[in-house]
Structures are given as structure tokens and as C-alpha cells.
Amino acid sequence: MLFVLLLILSLAASYILPWWTIAIMAFVASLLMANRAAQAFWSGFAALFLAWMVLSLFKSMPNEHQLAERVAQLFGLPHWTLLLLITCVIGGLVGGLSALSGYYIKQVVMPSTVKQ
């Protein structure tokens, strides 16, 4: 459930809000819904990895990945898909670590509600 919530929130908010708001959303969602540390991290990582993948492809397809290819060349990467993968991993780490932080804050503040 946490994965689906984060995926929907991050896809919807990406058109209106700055990129870093996904960290706040993952933190709050995990604070309210996460039951285990592994669940919090992997839900945040997977949801934001997938959201950034969808959004990157959605914005890159209309120009046939020309801009992505040029940016990949600028960074010395052999192909634009490697740039896409690196971008998605960064987004996933931001989501996963902020969701994990939310879980740990929940564990400190309300230890009786957290399952061990």
C-alpha cells in the first residue's frame, strides 16, 4: 500500500512541485504507514525509481531521446539509457532514504505502534 501511495503521489506532484518534494512525501507517508524498516526503504526506493523512469521516458520520447543522448555524451556515458538508469537510481535512493528516515522517526516517537 505504501508503494502505491508513493507512486501516485510522486507522479502527480512532479508536474506541480519541485523534485525534492518527493523526499517530504516519502517521509510523511512512511511515518504514517510503514511497519518495518525494509518495507519503508524498498517501497520508497521502488516507487520513486519507477516514477522517475516513467516521467523521464514520458519527457524524452517526444524528441526521440536526442537531449538525453547529448547529456549522456556530455557525461561520457555510452548511451542515454545509462543516464536514465543513473537518474532513476538517484531518485530511488532519495525516496528510499527519506522513507526510512520517516520510519525511524516513527520508531523513536511512537515505539508502541512499530512492529519489531
Image: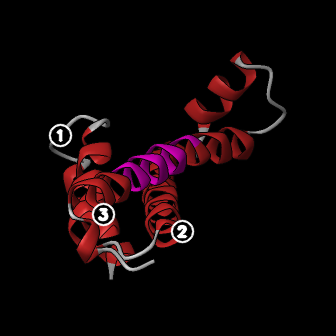
Q: Residue furthest left?
A: 16
Residue type at mark 2 is Ala
Q: CA distance from mark 2 to mark 3?
A: 11 Å
**According to the image, label 3 marks what residue?**
30
In the picture, residue 103 is in which quadrant? bottom left
* Mark 2 vs 3, N-terminal side: 3
**According to the image, label 1 marks what residue?**
17
Q: Please name which of the two marks, 3 or 1, marks the residue nearer to the observer.
A: 3
Tell me the element at label 1.
Answer: loop
| Quarter of the rendering occupied by the C terminus | bottom left
Query: What range of the chain is rendered magenta?
Result: 90-101
Most foreground residue, 113 or 50: 113
Q: Assign the magenta stretch its main secondary structure.
A: helix
* Mark 1 vs 2, N-terminal side: 1
Most foreground residue, 102 or 20: 102
**According to the image, label 2 marks what residue?**
38
Residue type at mark 1 is Leu
Is 17 a magenta residue?
Answer: no
Is 99 a magenta residue?
Answer: yes
